[in-house]
Image (spheres, helix red, strand yellow):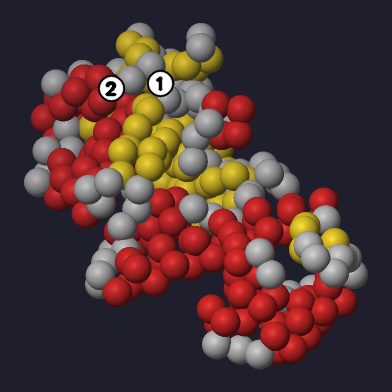
Amino acid sequence: MQTELSTISIFVTVVDAGSFSSAAEQLHLTRSAVSKSIARLEERLSVSLFKRTTRTLSLTAEGTLFYEHSQRAIAEIHSAESLLDQGKINATGLLRISAPVLFGQLYVAPLMVDFAQQHADLQIELSFNDRRVDLVEEGFDLAIRIGNLPDSHHLVARKLGMHRMLLCATPEYLHQSGRINTLEDLQQHSTIAYSYSGQLQKWQLQDEEQRQYAIKPRAKLMMNDMQSIKDAVLSHYGIAWLPDWLIHTELQENKLVQVLATFSSINFPIHVVWPALPYMPLKTRLAIDQLVTTFAK
């Protein structure tokens, strides 16, 4: 059951002052008003906070525990008031973030540089890794995840956007090798595939009637880095399946063109996730807000 902040403040003052009378004098209240506030607090908590004798006033074990937490809570409130008085909200401490390598380098890193400049007392450690880290076990505050999330009671998530894959090639390659009209035509073309841990990534497509296809490209060239695959495509080597956010500029400048545009990619969500905690640190909340606001544009 929630207790009133004013009552908690009176309780902390009594402990610090050492008596009801001294606390009443500091608070400009009557001794009776202070005593009644403590009695109401003990009733709501269903515990005795003080051991009372005619000469001494000391805390019970429950009172000691409650005092320690109450003191920290009031200190945090005073700190927040101070920040508001200064007209600024400043994140502090160390913020650890995990992000996929390429997406993190292109989009998350510049955003966090800007975020760090806004908060002079904040340290940011950005780790690039394509594996799914264990946030709690490895001590991360946030992680960026591409793809569907499994159900979890330990993580909270907010959606940042969608991740779409496109088949693409250069106009020069298609002029030399011929246009592609059907999925079967892909078998006659040079392709560059993405491989990870020895597994070749299949191209997941769907047609205009939402029928889905998982195509295993017959690739002579396989890489485990999307940027290197993009560079190979731009060198007119062949066709690849790449994230739209990686080739957005090249498509606009007609350096790349979409192949089989009637076959769309199965889209995947992009989320920011963080551990489910009783409270969220200010640094984490502000970083999440920055991510959500920026990716919504």
Q: How many marks?
A: 2
Kind of residue at badge 2: Ile
Please, what is the three-letter code of the amino acid marked with disc 1? Tyr
- Residue 105: x and y in percent read 27, 33
Q: Quadrant of the N terminus?
A: bottom right
> Residue 291, percent across and down?
36, 54
Report x, y in % for residue 98: 43, 33
Badge 1 is on which residue? 194
Q: Is residue 197 above or below residue 112?
A: above
Query: Which disc is residue 229 wearing?
Result: 2
Q: Does dot 2 land on a helix, a strand or a loop?
A: helix
Q: Are marks 2 and 1 in contact (CB under 8 Å)?
A: yes
Identify the residue at the far right of this view. Answer: 46
Mark 1 falls on what kind of element?
strand
Residue 1 shown left or right of residue 23 in the figure = right
Q: Earlier in the sequence, mark 2 or mark 1?
A: 1
- Residue at 16 percent across and 45 percent down: it is 249
